[in-house]
């Protein structure tokens, strides 16, 4: 059958042809682009008009169209109508695809009808290729750090004269935004009811003065430090009252307003069009996206401008970097009238860990790397317009806040967070016992960076060195696998291991001066009598925690020696101690169990890792002067038990054999001892790992890393040789070989090792700094600078990189650059005089001083 008989002769120069060409160009533009501009929204309207016009014109001229064109065009038209009815949103992607394919196919058939089809068809096909060459979904809104850090807080954000200072937050126009814009989360409910309901019950919503614990902190802070300093908090907690200018007024005037109760609304995150760095303090730019809101009625037909306005690339592809904007903070003179000091920081320890996949030296690595959203925004089934394959990310943001839900009487919120906390995040193991119960003098190592938080594998901070004996202490372990009879009246040290499992940041995370996280150990005899208890809670579990418990927290004091316990980080002047566990690491708590002389039979040990938000003291500070305070729940994050035999009593159950599976328990034990500086005990534990699991390369590496700390580099090399024989490309094996070679003065060899590791882990800051240091020691200053600048690109506040850059520029006689780096180094380095402020407090508070020691024993009570 001749082609003309099938297609008839609808011509290009007809009204249909003109409308068709315009619709083609218009449709290709809509596919290839998607930015929320006036031009794009007008083209959406034009597409609707052109579509209706084409349907009408072809219907009028249907006899000349040909049945093939009519059939394919009908499919395209039906798809267009379906989009108008159902919506052109992501959950209807199949309808959009069918409409697009049918429209393009009809266009090619139309082009084939033309006498000049040899030219028309290729031209149409070329136009159709544009969306493939310029995909509207390939955007470049990525987070990159500046080439260096600001020299002072006055240079952060919009500067000291900015409307939101000392918060780093900015707006695209440089001034305030309307109240309606930043608080109108309710408008999002129409299309996203599930997401809205989750957000409304989340801590992002209850972040401002609708949170009684936060409100009390600002009410306490403002009369002392002034209104302006509290804006430092507002960039993340109170964007509504900060961005509309209300935060220039006293808190008692704004706290109970709708703006003061709105928390972090949808646009607090989704109106961010730029994250300027990973230095935190709300270092973002908010855009009020006027066109996207003005043409919101078109979002149902074409959601791309809406997505492009409110869903940037970094929201999904750089989720952790995006979260760093508020989950990493520092204070400085405008806030604390003191100096730069790191506050809480969830980002850096994630970035440098095995969980991110970017850290080269972690003890453990998950099967696949994770970002914040993997835990705190899990995928949920949904028919939401934003759903991908029937799922969306949870906007409930499950986390660790169990205090606020109780305070606002939200049982569902509490249950979700309690379930989250109990979800195999931590592990407790009553692992070992020893007759050695004394501890020699040991002191924490002063940090090189100014911080009230912990430093993990993102830092090369020194490890404390235990000054006890060098001989291996007798250890009975694993306690549930080794039969041993203890004597009545004997003193026994019980070692309990706490390990992070499903965490991508320190345990605990967040504002670690504000809540109770502690390890509890209880011992009872066969009659149920308590013979030892550390970590109990007064008032039948409703009062303060035993002050001598093993705590996981940051404990600071102010300039007068008073504890920082009122969420008054701005007053902190010295850190008594910080005891947090990095991701993929462990801690060991030591307890002195005095077995009664009359004991016989079994002693039952029970260990619980407990968590309560908030601390009992802060709870009662918050509700001071009010009729009553809520009873905050204590959540058991992990529990375990073990029995020990006293005198001639037989074991209650047969002991199982020690197997290869116990190697990880020994490894955890060794990690905890190593981090405390008990190198002798750690080496013994890691050697047990190599015996139980000789093919586990990390066991050999861990022995070596302890030996390197002790200066036994030649011996360490032997253990590293075995590790690298098992896994030749093991990055951490090569890293520690580099350290050993560096200690031996083989800078060329060390540099090769660090370069090898950097190829695998190009964002491991410690590796980059070590490579730069080797080049500096070789006096290749220019090459060294390149390595240190790579570190600065990851963290512009890295104190080690700034220190070494200062030295490199001095080596090059570049006094201006050296002076600039020196200023940054002095800004970020620790205040060496700070620890002198702790002397009097330590003398007056022996329990806290005991907890300050890297290795200490808890005597408990009976």
Image (spheres, rainbow, N blue to C red):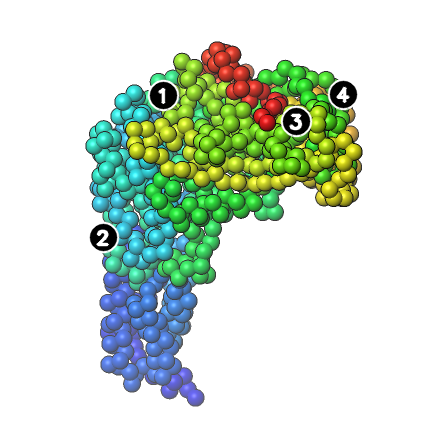
Q: Earlier in the sequence, mark 1 or mark 2?
A: 2
User: For residue 336, which numbered disc appears in the image?
Assistant: 1
- Circle count: 4
Q: Residues within 10 Å of mark 4 (few under 14, many from 20)?
A: few
Please state which of residues 244 and 46 is positioned toward the viewer in this rendering: 244
Element under disc 3: strand
Q: Residue at x 29, y 83 (%)?
A: 62
Identify the secondary structure beneath mark 4.
loop
Give the residue displayed 49% in from the left and 40% down from the top.
635
Q: Which mark is residue 506?
A: none
| Residue placed under numbered mark 4 in the picture | 471
Q: Which residue is mark 2?
A: 294
273 w.r.t. 574: above or below: below
Q: CA distance from mark 1 to mark 2?
A: 42 Å
Residue 392 in picture, x, y percent from top left: 43, 55
Neighbor class of circle 1 (other Cα within 10 Å; few <14, some 14-19, many 20+) is some
172 left or right, relative to 346: left
Task: Say which residue label 3 marks.
Answer: 593
The residues bearing labels 2 and 4 have C-alpha atoms spaced at a distance of 75 Å
Query: Disc 1, disc 3: CB below 8 Å?
Result: no
Q: Could you tell me residue 54's position as x and y percent?
A: 27, 73
Image-quadrant location for residue 191: bottom left
Q: Can you say which quadrant of the picture contains the C terminus?
A: top right
Horizontal side of 444 relative to 420 (left or right) equals right
Q: Which tag, 3 or 4, sits closer to the chain's start? A: 4
Q: Position of residue 585 (x, y in %)?
A: 60, 35
Q: CA distance from mark 4 to mark 1?
A: 47 Å
Are there few (<14), some (14-19), or many (20+) residues within 10 Å of tag 2?
few
Q: Nearer the viewer, mark 2 or mark 4?
A: 4
Note whether 696 is above or below 51 in the view shown: above
* 445 sits left or right of 58 in the view: right
Q: Where does the image place residue 634, in percent across and percent down from the top left?
A: 48, 38
């Amino acid at each position: 059958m001749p082609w003309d008989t099938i297609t008839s002769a609808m011509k290009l120069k007809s009204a249909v042809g003109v409308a068709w060409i315009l619709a083609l160009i218009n449709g290709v533009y809509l596919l290839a682009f998607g930015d929320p501009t006036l031009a794009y929204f007008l083209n959406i309207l034009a597409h609707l008009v052109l579509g209706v016009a084409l349907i009408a014109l072809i219907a009028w001229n249907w006899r000349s169209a040909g049945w093939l064109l009519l059939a394919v065009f009908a499919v395209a038209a039906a798809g267009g109508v379906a989009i108008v009815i159902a919506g052109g949103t992501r959950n209807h992607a199949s309808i959009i695809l069918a409409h697009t394919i049918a429209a393009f196919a009809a266009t090619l058939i139309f082009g084939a009808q033309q006498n000049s089809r040899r030219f028309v068809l290729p031209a149409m096909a070329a136009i159709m290729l544009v969306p493939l060459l310029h995909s509207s979904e390939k955007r470049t809104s990525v987070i990159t750090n500046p080439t260096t850090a600001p020299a002072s807080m006055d240079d952060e954000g919009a500067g000291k004269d900015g409307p939101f200072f000392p918060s780093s937050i900015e707006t695209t126009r440089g001034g305030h935004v309307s109240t309606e814009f930043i608080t109108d989360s309710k408008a999002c409910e129409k299309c996203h009811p599930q997401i809205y309901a989750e957000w409304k019950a989340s801590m992002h919503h209850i972040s401002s003065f609708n949170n009684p614990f936060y409100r009390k902190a600002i009410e306490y802070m403002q009369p002392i430090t002034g209104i302006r300093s509290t804006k430092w908090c507002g960039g993340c907690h109170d964007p509504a009252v900060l961005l509309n200018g209300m935060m220039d007024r006293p808190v008692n005037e704004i706290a109970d307003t709708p703006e003061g109760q709105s928390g972090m609304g949808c646009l607090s995150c989704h109106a961010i069009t730029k994250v300027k760095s990973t230095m935190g303090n709300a270092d973002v730019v908010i855009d009020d996206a006027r066109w996207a809101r003005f043409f919101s009625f078109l979002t149902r037909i074409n959601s791309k401008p809406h997505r492009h306005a409110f869903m940037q690339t970094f929201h999904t592809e750089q989720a952790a970097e995006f979260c760093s904007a508020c989950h990493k903070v520092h204070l400085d003179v405008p806030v604390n009238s003191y100096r730069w000091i790191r506050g809480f920081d969830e980002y850096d320890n994630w970035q440098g860990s095995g969980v991110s996949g970017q850290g080269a030296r972690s003890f453990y690595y998950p099967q696949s790397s994770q970002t914040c959203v993997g835990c705190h925004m899990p995928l949920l089934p949904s028919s939401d317009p934003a759903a991908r394959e029937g799922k969306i990310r949870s906007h409930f943001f499950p986390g660790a806040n169990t205090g606020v839900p109780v305070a606002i009487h939200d049982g569902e919120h509490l249950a979700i967070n309690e379930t989250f906390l109990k979800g195999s995040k931590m592990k407790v193991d009553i692992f070992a016992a020893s007759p050695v119960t004394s501890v020699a003098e040991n002191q924490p190592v002063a940090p090189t960076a100014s911080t009230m938080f912990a430093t993990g594998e993102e830092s090369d901070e020194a490890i404390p060195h235990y000054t006890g004996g060098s001989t291996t202490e007798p250890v009975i372990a694993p306690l549930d696998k080794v039969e041993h009879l203890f004597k009545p009246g004997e003193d026994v040290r019980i070692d309990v291991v706490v390990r992070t499992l499903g965490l991508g940041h320190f345990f605990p995370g967040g504002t670690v001066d504000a809540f109770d996280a502690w390890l509890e150990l209880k011992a009872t005899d066969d009659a149920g009598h308590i013979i030892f208890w550390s970590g109990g809670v007064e008032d039948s579990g409703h009062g303060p925690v035993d002050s001598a418990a093993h705590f996981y927290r940051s404990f600071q004091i102010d300039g007068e020696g008073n504890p920082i316990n009122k969420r008054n980080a701005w007053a902190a002047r010295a850190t008594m101690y910080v005891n947090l566990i990095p991701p993929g690491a462990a801690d060991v708590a030591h307890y002195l169990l005095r077995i009664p002389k009359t004991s016989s039979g079994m002693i039952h040990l029970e260990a619980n890792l407990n968590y309560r938000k908030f601390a009992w003291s802060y709870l009662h500070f918050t509700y001071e002067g009010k009729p009553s305070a809520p009873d905050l729940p204590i959540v058991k994050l992990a529990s375990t038990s073990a029995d020990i035999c006293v005198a001639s009593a037989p074991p209650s159950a047969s002991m199982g054999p020690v197997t290869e599976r116990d190697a990880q328990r020994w490894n955890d034990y060794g990690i905890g001892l190593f981090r405390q500086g008990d190198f002798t005990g750690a080496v013994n534990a890691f050697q047990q790992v190599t015996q139980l699991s000789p093919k586990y390369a990390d066991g050999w590496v861990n022995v070596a890393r302890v030996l390197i700390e002790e200066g036994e580099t030649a011996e360490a090399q032997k253990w590293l040789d075995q590790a690298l024989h098992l896994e030749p490309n093991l990055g951490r094996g090569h890293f520690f070989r580099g350290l050993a070679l560096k200690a031996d003065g083989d800078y060329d060899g060390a540099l090769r090792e660090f370069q090898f590791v950097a190829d695998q882990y190009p964002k491991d800051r410690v590796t980059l700094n070590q490579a730069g240091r080797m080049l500096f020691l070789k006096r290749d200053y220019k090459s060294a600078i390149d390595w240190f600048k790579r570190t600065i690109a990851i963290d512009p506040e890295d104190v080690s990189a700034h220190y070494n850059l200062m030295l490199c520029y001095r080596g090059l006689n570049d006094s201006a650059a050296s002076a600039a780096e020196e200023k940054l180094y002095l800004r970020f380095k620790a205040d060496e005089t700070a620890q002198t402020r702790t002397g009097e407090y330590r003398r007056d508070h022996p329990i806290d001083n005991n907890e300050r020691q890297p290795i200490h024993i808890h005597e408990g009570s009976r």
